[in-house]
Amino acid sequence: MKTLLLLRHAKSSWKDSDLEDHDRPLNTRGKREAPRMGQLLKEEQLLPDFILSSSAKRCRKTAEHVIHESGYRGETRITGDLYEAGAEQLRRVLAALGDEISRVLLIAHNPGLEELLEGLTGAYTPLTTAALARLDLPIEHWRDLSDDTRGVLVKNWQPRELD
């Protein structure tokens, strides 16, 4: 069995309208909620074996806060393949992971994350900014992750529900 942790990036700022979407930073709320989700990973003993993050600044900064607060010391890969990725692209990136990885944290964007979650569970589950979902997947190898894979949504944490 593999465990997939889906984390939507924390709330980003729209203050500077001259910035490209890819370069938008976290806003004040995002800077508060991202570390809280890192604490949650530590509290729930859900530290991943590997972190995959979109290259968008809001995702990279979310990852930095999560890593710092959780004490994660493993490998992190930042990739443009996750920026604006739909469910199928996210699934392809996950399917390329090595079998030594049992639990992965994927930090990316909507609507792709919600589409992936719905495809893997058969039910729509909203992911607000900085929301974290834990799925248990009935696969032994990431390469077996497909459109037919049906996992179990173990828990969906919304940051506003944690305080």
Image: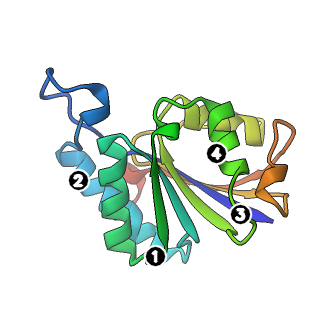
Give residue 112's quadrant in the image.
top right
Give residue 97's quadrant in the image.
bottom right
Q: Secondary structure at mark 1?
A: helix
Q: Residue at x 48, y 42 (%)?
A: 108
The label nearer to you, 4 versus 2, is: 4
Q: CA distance from mark 3 to mark 1?
A: 23 Å
- 1 or 2: tag closer to the N-terminus: 2
Q: On the image, numbered disc 2 is attached to which residue?
A: 31
Relative depth, front residue between 51 and 15: 51
- 4 or 1: tag closer to the N-terminus: 1
- 3 or 1: tag closer to the N-terminus: 1
The label nearer to you, 2 versus 3, is: 3
Q: Residue at x 67, y 49 (%)?
A: 94
Q: On the image, numbered disc 1 is attached to which residue?
A: 42
Q: Which mark is residue 98?
A: 3
- Amino acid at pointer 2: Lys
